[in-house]
Amino acid sequence: MATLALQGLHKRFGTVTALDGLDLELASGELVSLLGPSGCGKTTALRIVAGFEVATSGRVQVAGRDVTDVPANKRDMGMVFQAYSLFPNLTAAENVEFGLRVRRQAKAARAAKVAELLELVGLASAAGRYPYQLSGGQQQRIALARALAIEPSVLLLDEPLSALDAKVRVNLREEIRRIQLELGITTLYVTHDQEEALSISDRVAVMSQGRLEQVGTPAEVYRRPATPFVAEFVGTVNRLTVRVVDPAAGIVEHRGRRLETAEPLSLTAGAETRLLVRPEALVPSLAGADGTADGIGGRVVGTSFLGAVTRLWVDLGDGAVVAADVQSAAADAFTPGTAVALSIRPGAGRVLASDRSEADPVVAELPA
Amino acid sequence: MTALTDAPVVVDEAVGTRRPRPRRRSLAWLGAVPFLAYAFLFLVLPGVSVIVSAFQNTNGSFTTQWVRDLFQGQFLSANVNSLELAALSAITGGVVGFLAAYAVVTLGRPRWLRSFVTTFSAVAANFAGVPLAFAFVATIGSEGAMTKLLENALGVNISSFNLVSVTGLVVVYTYFQIPLMVLVVAPALDGLRREWREAAANLGASATQYWLRVGLPVLAPSVIGAMLLLFASGFAAYATAVALTSGLVNLVATLIGNYLSGNVIAQPQMGQALGLDMLVVLFVAVGLYLLLQRRASKWVR
Ligand SMILES: Nc1ncnc2c1ncn2[C@@H]1O[C@H](COP(=O)(O)OP(=O)(O)O)[C@@H](O)[C@H]1O
Ligand SMILES: [Mg+2]
């Protein structure tokens, strides 16, 4: 297997800058997700890697070899498209066989490879069916088998699950990861679905407006978002406007209530900033009498059962509603109307403070 | 909730399992009555009457004489001419029209080109009869403007080319066959997905390999189907042929016209037999077209 490197990729379409300097390296056998909102340039990056689009500037390397000027049909990359990419006039097996025929492999070798791959994606029984006789999920499995048949150096997937039902989506993403691990193939996976990216990737590269915001393991990106954008895009966050009380001790104040963040802040006392807190780092307690300990007072206005945890929607009194998670077993105490006090989970890991401007908020992290 | 099991469970949408719907009596068909009545009165009834009369003697008894006559003498040669004209004009119009449609669809630029070509084709496909014949006589007829221009400017003499012949008719017919092909085949070209071309390239195929294994096979039903439509229209076209040749070229359509206008009064049943002849040719062409169309629409969803 091979390493893949995207170096300083720029791409302009007329006046639109789709990629604004993208650098990303994939280790051999690694699955990296390009994660970002629609229009941030994910597809463009993938198409440049595949050779369907020419970068305005920048290079692409596979296993240390520069492939920037190699035509798409000579790159030996496997690509899975969003949907409807199977050749409609060929059966599932013939689709998988396509790349092998083009390579003029012997008939017996082709047949063996096709059988092996159909088995791998769990569709051996569908060999003779045409694409229109397959469900969306089955089509994507065949597309994956077809891309893998040529034993590509890298595998590229562009939102391969976005056209499928939620349930199929979850199943198939596990399947893709299983196969990827089994083959140990270097994989670049494009998605706008943060849950999908976090669940199957070795590393996640979060993109915004043609640039990388952060590259890290799913846990790093979730727990230690490098930028406010990442914090907001990956997972759910609450935004609180706070005033710095004691920067050295990491203490801030929300409308007179003290909140402890775990790390020193590089802001001056009295500065106003925004504190970003994950729902699971915001701990609600029953506020018996008025003014129990430190914390933000509020009233539960709704609950959503999410399985292991229940999400409380807490009105802070000024119209701002924040989300706080409690174990579902303990959720009965927090019926709508209940007065609660919210604190940041004690020892809540690292706090990321921006030292640039008040527009850049503070991010409170989850306990490790 | 789904149960967790230790074996990987493959959940996928079921495909092709259609539950039988409980049959319900509906009055929706009532809305189709006017249409069905119309179709019966103006399509089925005349068709049946043509078929019946083609097998009737002057005294009303059954005979196959007229139909047998279709395979002899001037009737046979009319069939040969008509088939030749239809086939040649369909192939010429089909190939040129396909290439034109392909150019317009894939170029995509400038934006107005597509709508211009489509609109022009819609008009040109219906340009037939006396005006079309006149246009050709006036340009490439023996005294035509283009004929003179070529002769005077380039010394090329095309005045020996006879418009009043099957070949001449083929040339004239392509004038509406090409635009007809553009109109019919452009949607099929739109149906070729970019993903197919890119997936093929990604798998190592050259442009030629893509066209041979995917592009052309996918388009084939639509292209052949469209050419069958051209064939049918070339076989049945009447006004242009009469205007251009005044019946001097022996064709099924013009023969029928002769019977219809009463130029030949001896055997009216022969006219019916010729009508049956044309019906059969059109039925076969359109039937094949529909078959291919079904296949094409299955692929390109
Ligand atoms: N062929 C193109 N022509 C013009 N603009 C394009 C083209 N492809 C992409 N873009 C623009 O580039 C930006 C990035 O697009 P894309 O890479 O498709 O984003 P994503 O896949 O992240 O949704 C978008 O603003 C899009 O409109
Ligand atoms: Mg995209």
Image: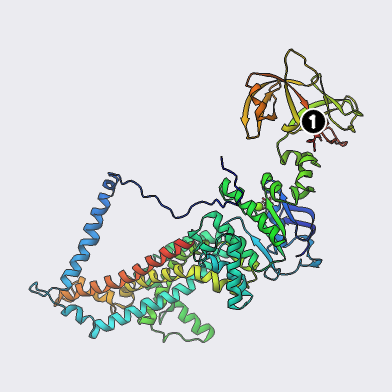
Res B175 → quadrant: bottom left
Q: How many marks?
A: 1
Residue at image coords 79%, 35%: A367
Compared to residue B67, the image places residue A146 above or below, namely above
Q: Which residue is mark 1?
A: A275
Residue at image coords 58%, 45%: A166
Return the residue nearer the eye: B26 or B235.
B26
**Mark 1 falls on what kind of element?**
strand
Return the residue nearer the eye: A333 or A144.
A333
B82 sits to left or right of B221: left
Q: Which residue sits furthest front? A: B6
Residue A255 can be seen in this image: yes
A140 sits to left or right of A156: left
Query: Which amino acid lies under the numbered mark 1 shown in the image of this protein?
Result: Leu
Return the residue nearer the eye: B56 or B81.
B56
Q: Can you give x and y, in whole percent of width and height, for residue A94 in the image?
A: 54, 69
Q: Which residue sits furthest left? A: B59
Compared to residue B142, the image places residue B272 above or below, namely above
Ligand 1 closer than 8 Å to label 1 CB: no
Q: Can you give x and y, in whole percent of width and height, for residue B66 in the image?
A: 17, 78
Residue at image coords 75%, 13%: A290
Compared to residue B97, the image places residue B26 above or below, namely above
Residue B107 can be seen in this image: no
